[in-house]
């Protein structure tokens, strides 16, 4: 009787674990603020690739996120060129080696210019409630609306290169 219950318990845990599917991140869609209907996004970030179009049969990726790098894709020459490096909340120019300049620093929901503290570097963008604002404060204009699963570093890279 005990072995039967043990076998049933094992089978039930295996069955439950088999039904649990891994969480697939939702594609990130960025819309212009003027586009209130949110029909056609400006950019789509899906599984590490950045596209300008969402539903085109001929859509081609223009950028790719891979580990801590963002690459520009060149289909004609079949190569990828490192353009940005993400390192501990800092967005650096190039492949991150030697004397790479820090362009943006991600600080919570704020993106700042360069490297420094909140006293020395102004806030360029604030991301909150699905919007990307220019500057901080209640009167900061909303530039873009955003949907999906993203990291602040990815959004900072997209703002720097594509928008």
Image (spheres, grey):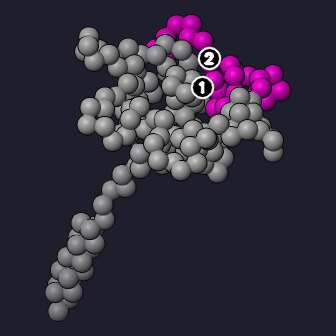
Residue at image coords 17%, 92%: 1
- Assess whether residue 110 is covered by the magenta stretch: yes
- The one nearer the camera, 107 or 39, is 39
Rendered position, 49 above or below 81: below
Residue at image coords 20%, 76%: 11
**Location of residue 18 in the rendering, given as x and y in whole percent from the top left corner:** 24, 66
Q: Secondary structure at mark 1?
A: strand
Rendered position, 17 above or below 67: below
- The one nearer the camera, 55 or 22, is 55
Relative to 3, is 131 on the left or the right? right
Report the magenta stretch's main SS. loop
Relative to 31, is 135 on the left or the right? right
Question: Gap between marks 2 and 1, in whole Å?
Answer: 6 Å
Q: Residue beneath label 2, please?
A: 102
- The one nearer the camera, 143 or 147, is 143
Rendered position, 51 above or below 84: below
Residue at image coords 45%, 27%: 68
- Assess whether residue 49 is covered by the magenta stretch: no
């Amino acid at each position: 009787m005990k072995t039967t219950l043990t076998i049933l318990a094992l089978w039930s845990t295996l069955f439950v674990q088999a039904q649990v599917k891994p969480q697939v991140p939702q594609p990130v869609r960025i819309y212009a603020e003027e586009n209130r209907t949110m029909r056609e996004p400006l950019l789509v970030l899906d599984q590490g690739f950045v596209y300008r179009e969402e539903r085109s049969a001929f859509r081609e990726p223009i950028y790719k996120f891979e580990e801590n790098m963002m690459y520009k894709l060149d289909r004609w020459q079949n190569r990828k060129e490192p353009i940005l490096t993400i390192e501990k909340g800092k967005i650096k120019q190039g492949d991150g080696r030697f004397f790479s300049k820090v362009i943006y620093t991600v600080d919570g929901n704020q993106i700042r210019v360069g490297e420094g503290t909140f006293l020395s570097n102004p806030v360029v963008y604030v991301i909150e409630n699905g919007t990307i604002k220019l500057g901080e404060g209640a009167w900061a204009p909303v530039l873009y609306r955003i949907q999906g699963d993203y990291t602040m570093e990815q959004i900072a890279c997209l703002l720097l290169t594509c928008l």
